[in-house]
Amino acid sequence: MSLGLPGHLAPHSESRAFARASHVIALVCLVSAELLLGSLQEARVGTILWPSMIALLPIFAALWLVERYRSWFFSVTYLIVGAASMYWFVLAGTSQFPGEATTDSYALTLPKIALIMVGGSGLGAWRVIGWSTLGLFAGEGATVLAAMQTGAAIVPDLPALAVYAIAAALLSLIGINRARVQRAKPSLQLAARDEHLSDIRHRIEVRAAAMLHDTVLNHLAAVASSPDGELRTDLRARIGRDLEVLVGEEWLVEPESEMDATNRAAWASSRLYRALDDARDLGLDVALTGDLTAFARLDATRQSAVALAVKQCLVNVIKHAGTDRAEVVIYGADSEVSVMIIDGGKGFSERETSVDRLGLRQSVRKRIETVGGTVQVWSTPGTGTSILIRLPTTDASTDASTGPETAS
């Protein structure tokens, strides 16, 4: 149920869409309850229902907060405020209809559904069901408590239970589907890795064939055209050098981008170069590949930001990944420079990272976003982590930094 989104974005996008829909349903229910009370007030002139209408107003405010911030604190606040408002709402409303009011009336069901819809605040499907269950208990508990004081008939609210059951069933299907997708991720990643290795093997085979053609066949032709007797000294030396190249592994290495003396000096004095050296000093084996000259296309502020962000990523590898190897790849396009940090460590789930671990959120993501860049993270427990940092080479309006930053 990824809706065609990348695997690392699908859960967050689905949860946010469900949360938005849940909060819209809650808002519609609250507005409908207010309109229903207003119509009853008009129909029964002797009743006093405006206290019940006022009782629902705090739920509107709590709903706005939980939609705006979507945190457990505001979800708890929504339940507490909603339960108190529901108690006041039922107490003031049922007291106006002695002998007639029941706890399953339509006017009382609507605010209960609004409380059930707090479940949209959760990110995981099972957490959402838990929040919805708390909302159901809060609404029913406040209703029963108020009805016991006013003498209203306590009847099971079947419509509210039906809404809860439908929401729980839908979320259970989402949770089961997500678990299936998570189980399939390692297989997909292994398949992608195998495909990548197959492509590497193919390139090596092509290069090996070309190398053999350039050396063996040429040497055979040279030997065939040589006069009888001992090979010339220069020909023997050339064959010896080519054999050393074939036996060695230098020809397997991708050629690095050419750097003149100026660019090499600029790279050696860059903050990113020093960040990689610092990580190596801490015991991490860092492999550097790509177009090193592309880094010089960033302005000083962005160079500083990406250097500090990469350093934090490498520190995270040392502290949390359970591996002593990492790779940093630099490459540039027409209007941006990208830096990717790859490790084959334990991996993690970013949304489940504890709130006290601010390295990725503040020292990487926020730092890069501040200078107009973006950060993408691909990680699955047990399969390693890849972090892609992309920065524009032109001035951006979001570049608000005015000086070098300090590492956090």
Image (tube, rainbow, N blue to C red):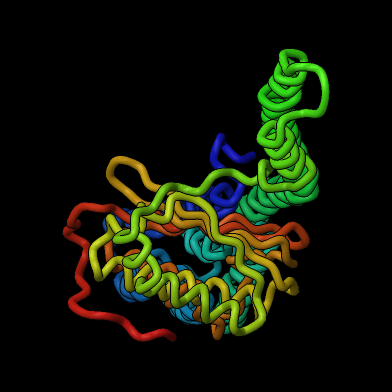
Q: Nearer the viewer, residue 169 or 5?
A: 5
Residue 215 rendering spot, x and y as whole percentages: 70, 27
Residue 266 rendering spot, x and y as whole percentages: 32, 66
Q: Nearer the viewer, residue 27 or 8?
A: 8
Residue 355 rendering spot, x and y as whole percentages: 55, 81
Residue 109 rendering spot, x and y as whole percentages: 53, 59
**In this view of the protein, can residue 293 be seen by the observer?**
yes
Q: Nearer the viewer, residue 143 or 65?
A: 65
On screen, residue 78 above or below 343? below
Give me the residue at 58% from left, 66% from top: 351
Give me the residue at 52% from left, 64% from top: 121
Counting the numbered discs, the total is 0
Give me the residue at 74% from left, 71% from top: 323
**In this view of the protein, can residue 47 be seen by the observer?**
no
Q: Quadrant of residue 173?
A: top right
Q: Quadrant of residue 366?
A: bottom left
Q: Is residue 31 left or right of residue 112?
A: left
Give me the residue at 57% from left, 71% from top: 139
Q: Is residue 34 left or right of residue 234?
A: left
